[in-house]
Image (spheres, helix red, strand yellow):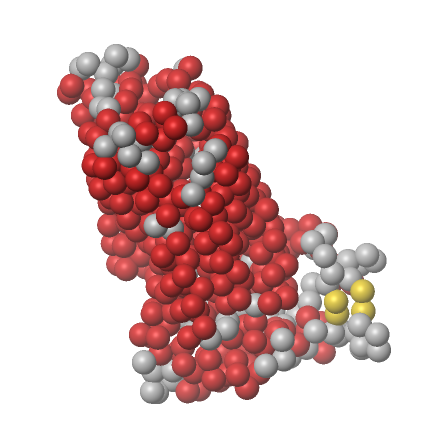
Amino acid sequence: MGKIFNVSLAIFAATGSFLFGYDAGVMTDVIGSNNFLKYFNTEDTSPIIGAINSTFNGGAVFGSLMGGLTMDRFGRKMTIQIGALICLVGAILQSAAVNLGMILVGRIFAGWAVGLLSMAVPVYQSECAHPKIRGLIVGMAQQMIGVGFIVSTWVGYGSSYAGDHSAFQWRFPLAFQAVPCIILATGMFFFPESPRHLMATDREDEALRVLKKLHYDGSNGEWVQNEFDEIKQTLAAEKSVTVPGWRVMFTVPQWRTRLMHGVAVQVFTQMSGINVIGYYQVIMYKALGFTGGKAILIAGIYNCVGPVSNLLFIVFLLDRVGRRKPLLFGTIGITLALICEGAINSQNTSGTRHSLSIAGVFFIFLVSIIFSFSFGPISWVYMGEVMPMQIRARGNAFATGIGNWLVATFWAQISPIALGDIGWKFYFIFVAFNILITFPVIFFFFKETKQVSLEDIDLLFGDRALGALPDDLHKEGALEMHPGAVEVENHEVGNKV
């Protein structure tokens, strides 16, 4: 019962990740709609198209940072529900748009919601997951992002048959976002709050009941009780102090290091170029000689390849091979695929050499497959794992908002212009970054965290044993004591290695 419920919770919560994938992917079809381009008097490589995508990503920056506050104040579950309701507003504005301003505001709302969801869902999943299947559980986030891309593409492809004379061609794909929004906002009432958040808010009895529901298999009652005691011990040390604001994440060396790991894995994910392909693959296929409905059809097939690969990886490999090796493999593989893509495009600038065009599509697909066996799921799993409980909400908010969405905003704005102006040379920006920065940082600094409890991960980063507070917290300005609280010394806390 425990494992089945745990996986069911992860899949349903990942409806928030589905919205991420759908909202990001739907614009591929929308900008491929001739009716949309004519209605707003623009073209697919214009700054206006970049603005539509960059406002979405900009809204996500704000949403991610806001999530650091709402998750601690209202909980993980309610933050997910808030995100779903905000996304519903965005869907209504976009689908009913009569001018560019409504589209832009709608995309800001959608981005705001997706920013909240993109950091809240992995945290909720990781805090509810059993350590042995945490890769599978949190990997569901990336899986549902991929499913969202698939659904958006095929909804868009089907809508394209309405014809260039009909606004249904782009209004219906934008309106369809409302369906998962309503399902997520209402369905989360039937799932529990994260046990770690319950314990942090002094609801220990409820937390123990949730832990049993999530992890009890009929014979591991002692393990569940030990997990409960371990979480309680870790939180006990924190409750003797107040750790206000965001500054503490940067002033405590251990926490700063772990925050930078989370930020780095998100930056490296964006610098793989995957979102540029996701947003603007229709433009890339056009450069290879595939236009109109054929380009949207190829995009639909592309969006199926990643989720299938991701599912195979999270079910059969992720919790066995770990995090670090797949990231190194992914960096090398994506880099080589982008080099091949750039070389092929350089020899086929008119898109008339059919064999090279097919090869170009192949390497774009290959990037998606390699990404799904590396950065796709691991970026969310690793980010959720490395953050300590004290800064988990704020840390994930910062890593997602700055590392993921701020970088994505930049590429969303300039990519259509760059693809129009410099074409195949654009790929080599990502190649250079992967070679010079991504691979060395992962190789020398990233830790292996597979099948380690969230509390035991403290030890991988040089923290003292479980429940002990780093000395840095006692430095002036790093914390303020609760009135009347007694300072907890490290040797007074029951440590457990």
Residue 362: x percent and y percent? 22, 31
Tell me the quarter of the picture where residue 296 sits: top left
The residue located at (60%, 67%) in the rendering is 74
Q: Is residue 183 left or right of residue 80?
A: left
Q: Quadrant of residue 292?
A: top left
Q: Is residue 204 above or below residue 263?
A: below
Q: From the viewer's perspective, is residue 485 above or below residue 115?
A: below
Quadrant of the image containing the C terminus: bottom right
Residue 25 locus on image (x, y percent): 36, 41
Residue 176 shows in the view: yes
Looking at the image, the residue that sits furthest to the left is 355
Image quarter in which the N terminus is found: bottom left
Residue at 40% x, 43% y is 95
Please provide percent x and percent y for residue 334: 34, 34
Depth check: give the residue in front, 102 or 262: 102
Q: Is residue 491 visible?
A: no
Closer-to-camera residue (185/390): 185
Q: Identify the residue at image location x=23%, y=20%.
A: 289
Picture quadrant of residue 276: top left
Residue 393 lies, in percent from the top left, at 58, 59
Residue drawn at (23%, 16%) of the image: 351
Q: In front: 56, or 178?
A: 178
